[in-house]
Amino acid sequence: MQAKQPSPPIIRSSNLRTCRGSRVSLQPKLQGTEAEAVWQKTVSAPESMVALDLFCGAGGLSYGFQEAGFVCALGIDREADACETHAANLFSKTRCQDIREILHPLQLMEELGIPRIDVIVGGPPCQGFSLVGRGKVRSLSKEMQDRILRQNYLYREFVRFVKALRPLFFVMENVPHLRSFADGIMMQAIRDDFDTLGYALYPEVLEAAQYGVPQHRRRLFIIGTRIGWVYRRPRTTHGETIPVRTLAEAIADLPPVQAPALLDELPYSPHRSPDVGITGDYAILMRSAVSPIHQSVIFDHVVRPVREDDRVIFHAMKQGDRYRDVDPQYRRYAMKRSQRDGRDCFADRYYKLPWGQPCVTITAHIAKDGYRYIHPDTNQPRTLSVREAARIQSFPDHFRFAGYRTSRFNQIGNAVPPLLAEAVARSIARALREYRQGISEEHAQCFRWQPLLPGFHKALIVS
């Protein structure tokens, strides 16, 4: 009888010591009396399209709307680092405050000198709406579950601001599963709330890759308007005649780095890898607004440390490999089947990204670990850098992020990709301009002019 072969030795590295890196501090773009005067003139101009961003985070929605021609007058969020990021990159005021503490939205607009709001945008927190979120919620304590459920009703704060400020449009962004959450009760409640306020709703799910974002990311946009059925779904730009952008298009030009990479500023010259097949157009877009003095610099190309056993694993993995493809002697977690759905637990915990496809969805979990985002280059056995994650989300290279590395990853993962936001914003801008152009003298009797705020410019209110 043949002797049973011994199991292969389990190879383990010791846990890594904390390697936090430096904190990035940024100055607000809107500061000083001259800048304040320019901002005030811009938000007060009758032709301006003025937006308010609730739950603004780092400013993905704000930046996308700005690129589409809107003036982002104000962003509100309770996370200090995200507010610092928003203030540094947007010519906008930023309020770091829990939205529930703002009892009188109209009064706040008056205090800040904002005469009207044409569009309110925002993405209320969605921990319980996603499939991943619901699985996690079930494993938490009752106290934490109650806290998350309370957060899921933060959309009512969004409704409260819409009711108070009466914008012509609003855009509420969330995960697609909000539509089916709680057997559709939540979505019906949202419909009822906005129907009561007189808004027509356009709920639609958009795929970011079809709008030039080098990432598969499906998001629900609930667009509301009180000026009739005037909104048109944004036309896709990629996927039919123009191929979708790939991970290679997004990050292959960035300089190779090894983990840990902790310098927030590195030399930049376009790096060309001969085997990934990129045009370079996306890199040009990402670099287009970098200031002349920073053309030879790349910011935020920082990478977390990697355990030695993980370094070996990352090097050995092929593009597209997952945890189930890892040599058993290196596996840190046992491959078990879920009693709930029979699937392999941890099967997708590691994932080596392929060059030739859009990246998988960048989520806020990248702040905890990057195992689902392993760099495809065998010579760079590491996870993605902050700048690479930002590129995949379509944040351009001049857009900086405040805080420590973990916070920056979190801000990026929570953001709406600016290119996707811009596509939605352009459709709203088209409808808004057509609406304004359609107001003629012969129809003037259908409208009345009145100050939205005492002492400020007039705003058009539908009678």
Image (cartoon, rainbow, N blue to C red):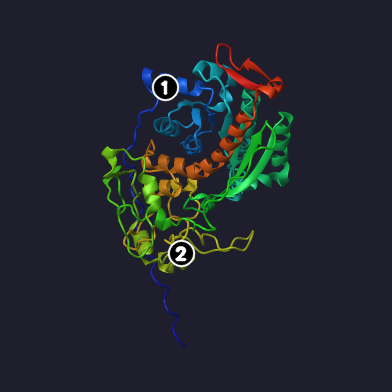
Q: Is residue 355 above or below residue 110?
A: below
Which label is found at residue 212? Answer: none
Q: Is residue 254 visible?
A: yes
* Residue at (52, 58) in percent of width and height: 241
Q: Nearer the viewer, residue 13 or 75?
A: 75
Nearest to the observer: residue 42 or residue 74: 42
x, y (%) of residue 32? Answer: 36, 20
**Number of other residues with Cα within 10 Å of mark 1, as a class: few under 14, some 14 to 19, many 20 or more:** few
Q: Is residue 101 above or below residue 307?
A: above
Q: CA distance from mark 1 to mark 2?
A: 50 Å
Residue in the foreground of this view, choosing between 371 and 201: 201
Circles 1 and 2, Cβ within 8 Å, touching? The answer is no
Drawn side of residue 175 relative to residue 416, left or right: right
Q: Mark 1 against mark 2, which lies toward the viewer?
A: 1
Q: Residue at x 50, y 57 (%)?
A: 242
Q: Which residue is mark 1?
A: 38
**Label 2 SS:** loop
Residue 364 x %, y % = 49, 45
Q: Label 1's element?
A: helix
Q: Amino acid at mark 1?
A: Val
The residue lying toward the viewer, choosing from 100 and 205, is 205
Location of residue 448 in the rendering, given as x and y in whole percent from the top left corner: 68, 18
| Residue 100 found in image quarter | top right
Residue type, label 2: Gly
